[in-house]
Image (cartoon, helix red, strand yellow):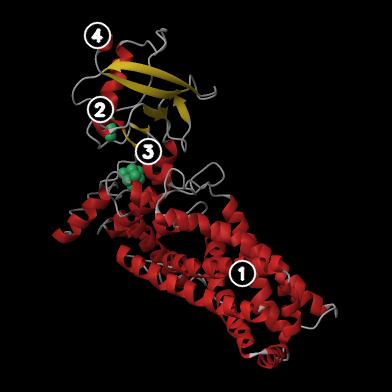
Amino acid sequence: MMSEDKQVTLIVTRQDDPESAPYDETFKIPYRNNMNVISALMEVRRNPVNANGEATTPVYWDMGCLEEVCGACSMIINGKPRQSCTALVDQLEQPIRLAPMSTFPVMRDLGVDRSRMFDSLKKVKAWVPIDGTYDLGPGPKMAENKRQWAYELSKCMTCGVCLEACPNVNSKSDFIGPAAISQVRLFNSHPTGAMNKNERLEALMGEGGLAECGNSQNCVQSCPKGIPLTTSIASMNRETALHSFKSFFGSDHEVE
Amino acid sequence: MAANREFLYRRLHSLLGVIPVGLFLIQHLVVNHFATRGPEAFNSAAHFMENLPFRIVLELFVIFIPLYFHAIYGVYIAFTSKNNVSSYGYFRNWMFYLQRISGIITLIFVTWHVWETRIQAGLGNVEVNYALMENILENPFMLVFYIIGVISTTFHFANGLWSFLVSWGITMSPRSQVISTYVTLGVFVLLSYVGIAAILAFAL
Ligand code: SF4
Ligand code: FES
């Protein structure tokens, strides 16, 4: 009498490859205590039979850490983008609707390609350059309160939720999105990272840069890590405005 | 500088919306408010404005060029966003959406209004005075159109002022942005009152 037991219903938006059309498929899986969306998907993978009893291909999705630090498992769960590893079945309304994030190209089923985010991080140089031909020695110390503040910004896992929620990140625009803007704030405030401050600001002032933000503020409402994205954006608005005033006529004032 | 063109356009768009277009809006609504003191008061105020020296230059550089740069670039901005208030019904997202809708309504209204008053006057077909407005607003359809147009314009200005403060990095913290929400709400209510009072003075 297994089928009489409590069941979980999943409606998954699937897509066989990047080119093909998406379609919905429903699955009914046996309920277990403390399930999350990933364990429900694993159940589908174990027994890839849809709700009509037809054999189908197992659903594909991405995952890594299983503890909401890698960002790979983001998908739309009941209409909102979030991590499937921390989406608990008990807290979700059924049927549970799963769809890939729409801002990114779908590779297969729930797996998307977030390359644009990594490209953005490269574009704004979201790192502290320390490689060179000789030992640079220890960097300056960072005040503890500043370290704590920076830690909050450093929690970004490039999950893509803020880009998905943003009305200005879409196929009609090349807006870089909130995550990379906040990373500029993080690395520009780092004592060694600040050496490349202006390069990062200029990247933000380029095509698709922070000026395309329209202040809908969906990002800050959606970020699973509670990163103060809109404060970071406003802060970078201030920095880029000052930078543009100072270098308006091509002054070398800003060379450090 | 070429790489920064978009940045410059965007910031110029934000700036021009407030200075001079927003300031002109306030001045225009205040002058209109003379209508509440009767036809003579309005006519003499309108006459004064009409006879400002260098009027064409002022109109071009303080009103039309900045206004239509703001409007046309704004329409482009509005159509590159993909509104999603149904999935993300947050207050600010609604304001973002309404800013785009009110922008389009305001553009239609202002263009019509300029055509009906300034351009017709320029062509020598009408004279801009109390009687002209009284005539236009006699039509109940036009009265509703003008009321919606003015509210949409004041909303677009007040909410745009809020965005302006963020886009230039003046309000940064969530708290300062909440306070500026209330302040700009006040601007919206006050300017709407000033504008509607004048419309009703013409119409009633
Ligand atoms: S800022 Fe938040 S929502 Fe955006 S990518 Fe980073 S962790 Fe995800
Ligand atoms: S698997 Fe890493 S965040 Fe979910």
Q: Three-letter amino acid code at disc 4?
A: Met
Is the residue at mark 1 from the same chain as the one at mark 4?
no
Please tell me in which quarter of the rendered image ligand 1 is found: top left
- Residue occupying image coordinates x 54% and y 66%: B156
Helix, strand or loop under label 1: helix
Please identify the quadrant where the C terminus of chain B is shown.
Answer: bottom right
Q: Is residue B1 visible?
A: no
Could you say whether the residue bearing mark 3 is in a helix, strand or loop?
Answer: strand
The CA span between labels 1 and 2 is 53 Å
Which of label 3 and label 4 is nearer to you? 4
Few, some or many residues within 10 Å of mark 4 (<14, 14–19, 20+): few
Q: Position of residue A186 (x, y in %)?
A: 29, 54
Disc number at residue A81? 3
**Mark 1, residue position:** B147
- Disc 3 or disc 1, which is closer to the eye? 1
Label 3, label 4: how far apart the Cα atoms are? 33 Å
Q: Name the residue nearer the viewer: A128 or B122.
A: B122
Report the chain holding disc 3: A
Return the residue at label 2. A36
Q: In the rendering, which numbered label is found on residue A2?
A: 4
The 10 Å Cα crowd at callout 3, few under 14, some 14 to 19, many 20 or more, is many
Subunit that carries the residue with mark 4 = A
Sequence-wise, the earlier of marks 3 and 4 is: 4
